[in-house]
Amino acid sequence: MIGPPRLRIRHLLLAVALAAAPLALPAAPASADGPHANLYCTNTFVSDIIPAVTPELRHNESTSHGLTGTADCTGTIDGYQVTGTGIFGQQTQGAGDCNEGGGQTQAELQIPTTGGVKTVVANAIYHYDNRIGIAGLTGQETGPVDFIIVDGDCWNVPLSHNTSVFTGTVIT
């Protein structure tokens, strides 16, 4: 008998957390077509998943409850060089279960630069597949997502809360 995956559940949480982003973050002040960012970031954040992820396929949303995470980035925004660590928030919306899922995510970053604090909003698609151990984003945010801490194992206890790290590019 094959037991349920345990370590790969981390990937599930990230994907669900990232899928609800477009719902709760305010629009960023920007030019008509938005700020142009070319960043490489490690973003760490905590998310709540509503409703919690279970073996049953269903719609989920996730939120970091505003700009509560950290954005450790290098690169430029509108030609200004990043000068320090910023703040990060995300919302996701999608569908999934303990095995796989996907959806849309929106992240907001406020980053200090040589031109002052700049706000960037990035949209992406997330997907996770715990059967093969992958989770990540593609779009204006591209890269893997790793779960550091999760509440629940999905199969026996629903996944409702997680701490995640996204490492990759943010290009708008």
Image: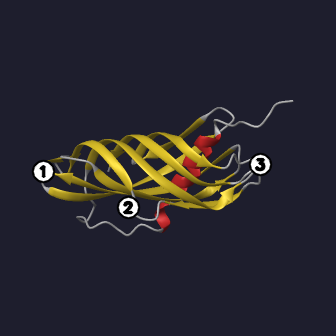
Q: How many marks?
A: 3
Q: Residue furthest top?
A: 1
Q: Amino acid at mark 1?
A: Thr
Q: Position of residue 52 (x, y in %)?
A: 66, 58
Q: Is residue 145 left or right of residue 52?
A: left
How far apart marks 1 and 3 lie (CA) works out to 49 Å
Q: Amino acid at mark 3?
A: Asn
The residue at which mark 1 appears reads as 114
Between marks 1 and 3 in the image, the one whose residue lies nearer the viewer: 3
The residue at which mark 3 appears reads as 156
Q: Is residue 171 left or right of residue 142?
A: left
> Which residue is drawn at the image coordinates 37% and 61% (left, top)?
67
Q: Position of residue 26 (x, y in %)?
A: 38, 69
- Mark 1 or mark 3: which comes first in sequence? 1
The residue at which mark 2 appears reads as 67
> Which residue is drawn at the image coordinates 71% and 46% (left, top)?
98
Between marks 3 and 2 in the image, the one whose residue lies nearer the viewer: 3
Q: Is residue 81 above or below residue 103?
A: above
